[in-house]
Image (cartoon, rainbow, N blue to C red):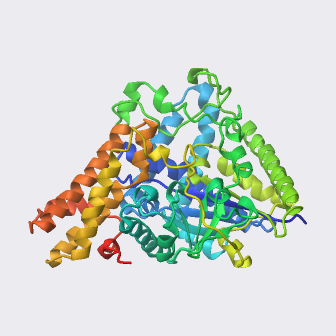
Amino acid sequence: MGKGALALVLHAHLPYVRSAEPGSLEEDWFFQALIECYLPLLQVLEEAAAAPNQHPRLTISLSPTLLSLLSDDDLKHRFPAWLAVRLDLLAQTSSDLQPAADHLAEIIQRHLHQWLACEGDLIGRFAQLQRSKVVDLLTCGATHGYMPLLREHPEAVRGQLRTAVREHHRLLGEHPLGIWLPECAYYEGLDRWILDAGLRYTVLDGHGLLHATPRPRYGVYAPICSRNGVAFFGRDSDATLPVWSAEQGYPGDPFYREFHRDLGWDLPIEQLHGIGLKEPRPLGLKLHRVTDQTSPLEAKAVYEPAIACARTKEHAQLYLKGRRIQLDQLANTMAIEPLLVAPFDAELFGHWWFEGPTFLAEIFRQASKEQVYFTRLRDVLTSNPQLQLCEPCPSSWGQGGYHDYWLNDSNAWVVPEWSRAGKAMVERCSLGVARESDLRLLQQAARELLLAQSSDWSFILRAGTTTELAKERIHRHLNRFWQLMQAINDKQHLPEDWLITLESEDGLFPFIQATDWARIRD
């Protein structure tokens, strides 16, 4: 029997893209993630858990903003109609695309059936998998705030973490023990606030452990513990590169589905007008394969599902053999059993890499034969209570490994805005409010501040994609924050209909507590 284990860690997250407008771009983001990632992932885990010869184990974070979207009744109600539009478009494709279109339609209909069967309660299905000890559910920052850029006001960090834990408990019925730090970003002393929120472990990129003080004896192949009592796991690049890299890994295979070729770009504008779109944009309907990574989109060949499925079996076997060799080599040099931690964005599996869920199903199916065993992060800590004492190094898993991606010429302007708003929030929450009605305003101001702090908008500004949307979101939430704070400070009465609209649009985190932002006195 082989020694050691593989810990697959998925981070499921979307920014708070709730929109009251059916057919909006923000709605598309959420619904595409539902049909391409979250529903297939649940199916894979549930089927693997039910199979007598499989032992799936997975750690997955569900960000508080994603949980808010998953629990939204309006979005649940609109999802089937959104799918119906796409099924209708697939039925109208040309004859050369029809086999690929029929295959995609069959997948959509299968997941729609599952959606209807559980009445859209994906949160309940994730919770059941945790109760069955198949998954370990982690939380994240409340709105995925980039903690190193919020550290000027530690209360802002505390607000992100405490709000996240409270929301996780509200929706999943259990207090989380672990957290996925947004962008895996860490700074010195952050472990104090992780512990303050009742959290005990997290994941860093490899150099967060390799550059720790003192240097960990086993590198990234065993967790470490900080002096504040928080455990840290390090990403292993050998276990992650084959899966996430489109250039060097499996997703770039010529027979896998091409991400960038979409019917939304190919259909006549008149047909798009017929479904309510004013201009071309991705619809989540992709019927071509990678073909050649250097070929233009118009030269992509039609997707062939049977060949792609066969490739996932081959790649799963390759991946497992590679991990078994890696674990055997490590076991010969370590006094404890080695651990491979492989963290990924959950949306890689199904959204970015269409065959990703099938690949996961295959590695669960083939793992016993290849003598690879899976574990959850919490189980590692339960079975190995003695950890080396080390202070992890500031780091992130973004480009460059530190904080450059979220602090550069494209997005640095927002950091002083966060700081100014954070300072005002701390001062007001430390003083309290004079009127009972002001508590309602202060709680909404906390929501707006959290939403403005989302690292997703900074990421988009740096990536140069939907930058106008990102700017609009940042300014919208900051403007609303300042309107609310001014009303409190000047004892103004805001129009009730405006407040109701605000609370409807940005009504997440119903248990938010303004005292989380009260001044910290050491």
Q: Quadrant of residue 72?
A: bottom left
Q: Can you see residue 340? A: no
Quarter of the rendering occupied by the N terminus: bottom right
Q: Is residue 38 above or below residue 515?
A: above
Residue 354 position, x and y percent, is 62, 43
Q: On the picture, is 103 further left or further right than 85?
A: right
Instruction: Tally the marks.
Output: 0
In depth, the one of 84 and 480 nearer the eye is 480
Q: On the picture, is 7 further left or further right than 69?
A: right
In depth, the one of 66 and 184 nearer the eye is 184
In depth, the one of 140 and 190 nearer the eye is 190
Give the residue furthest to the front: 214
Q: On the picture, is 22 further left or further right than 207?
A: left
Residue 394 position, x and y percent, is 55, 57
Residue 484 position, x and y percent, is 19, 62
Q: Quadrant of residue 374?
A: bottom right
Quarter of the rendering occupied by the C terminus: bottom left
Residue 446 position, x and y percent, is 29, 65
In depth, the one of 386 and 9 nearer the eye is 386
